[in-house]
Image (spheres, coloured by chain):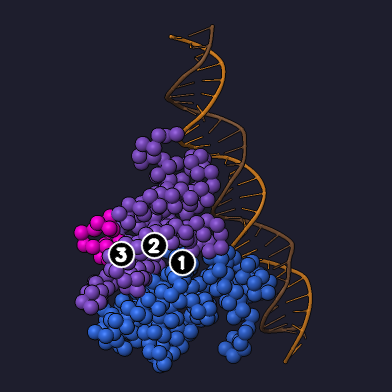
Chain colours: A purple, B blue, C orange, D brown
Amino acid sequence: MTAAGTQTSTRDRLLDAFETLLKDGGSRAATLDAVASAAEVSKGGLLYHFPSKDDLVAGMLARIHEMGDADVARMRTAECGPVDFYLQTSVDTGSPFDRALIAAARIAQESPGSPEGQRARDTMARLRQGWFEVLAEHLGDDSLARTVQLIGDGLYFDDITGLAHGGSLDHVRDTLRRLGAL
Amino acid sequence: MTAAGTQTSTRDRLLDAFETLLKDGGSRAATLDAVASAAEVSKGGLLYHFPSKDDLVAGMLARIHEMGDADVARMRTAECGPVDFYLQTSVDTGSPFDRALIAAARIAQESPGSPEGQRARDTMARLRQGWFEVLAEHLGDDSLARTVQLIGDGLYFDDITGLAHGGSLDHVRDTLRRLGAL
DNA sequence: CGTACTGTACCGGCTGGACGGTCTAGCATG
DNA sequence: CATGCTAGACCGTCCAGCCGGTACAGTACG
């Protein structure tokens, strides 16, 4: 039962390794051997904790849900306001949450028609819904909230596909400032 | 040499099938066997036209370059203006160009560290540059152009990952209309 | 205190299937 | 008969998942 207390457990190390491989090398690089090796665990050890690759994905998504709830809470009370917080965290800051999100996005696109891909997409949709609610509530305008969210998605997309966009965030801030003047 | 004249050639059918499989089933589903089968060609026939999978990718990217140049030209002279044209074509309209673009995005993310992934990313970067130039020229404002482009990327991302966004485009138009009033 | 048993965590060789790529044999048309 | 194109069996590699181990901690019992 491991009592849900021991941290940096083998289980978490495996999930970390899985996410990192997914992010840096794509889904093709995230083989069971590679994950086990990166987590300094044998393949048998990995399969003890996660009986199949699907279970590994499920474990990752479950962890994302937890982190997602915490992120929405932080967004709500962010000093710079929800919008800027949202945009800031839409570019890869190197945080575990970003890593997990990029990993989930890879899975979602890897198997568009499979159940595991569907679960990844459901997870992302749920997160987006949470962010949208905070955005809409704060801006008091659904159209604007949706647009801000799309900009965040764009920033994410550029990051994920590795398209450099240095300074894009400043451009967006500039534009939004003008919008806010209305 | 095929004289660059014969249309709906086996070659094009193979590329079409490759793109469709990439779009609908992800890169894992786009195996040589599956591509050949979908194009109603034998594996040997496929490998006659494209000696390796890399060549298949290269062929797809080359076709995208051609279509991209044509798209930029159409964008420049679009009746509804470059911005709306750009946003309209940022959601999957089901056109061959969109299909090809989604396919390229899949490749770009599949192998972040491989040469073929790099080429796909280069192709996308070049296309984005072309669109940006028209946008910036028309809007006369780099920040706004960059923001519009990010919105387009966001629309694309949502499409690619299969996150429904019914009416998002209208929200964006609404927001941009207000921005344009400045 | 020692022995036997149980459950948890982990190890790594193995297999069967899938996939990229090769090879050779055909077939149509000029 | 040659050339452009197609066919599909075949091969080597890679990978997910399986399975027979090892180590060790607890604990039950005499």
Which label was assigned to residue A137?
3
Question: Whole-percent x and y of residue A144?
Answer: 32, 73
- SS category of the residue bearing label 3: helix
Mark 1: amino acid? Leu
Residue identified by numbered label 1: B163
Residue A128 versus residue A91: which sits nearer the camera?
A: A128
- Name the chain letter of the residue that bears numbered label 2: A
- Name the chain letter of the residue that bears numbered label 1: B
Quadrant of the image occupied by residue A163: bottom left
At 43% across and 49% down in the image, what residue appears?
A62
The CA distance from mark 2 to mark 1 is 9 Å
Residue identified by numbered label 2: A128
Asked if residue B109 can be seen in this view, the reply is: yes
Query: Which is more N-terminal, label 3 or label 2?
Result: 2
Asked if residue A148 can be seen in this view, the reply is: no
- SS category of the residue bearing label 1: loop
- Image quarter (top left, top right, bottom left or bottom right) of the C terminus of chain A: bottom left
Mark 3: amino acid? Glu
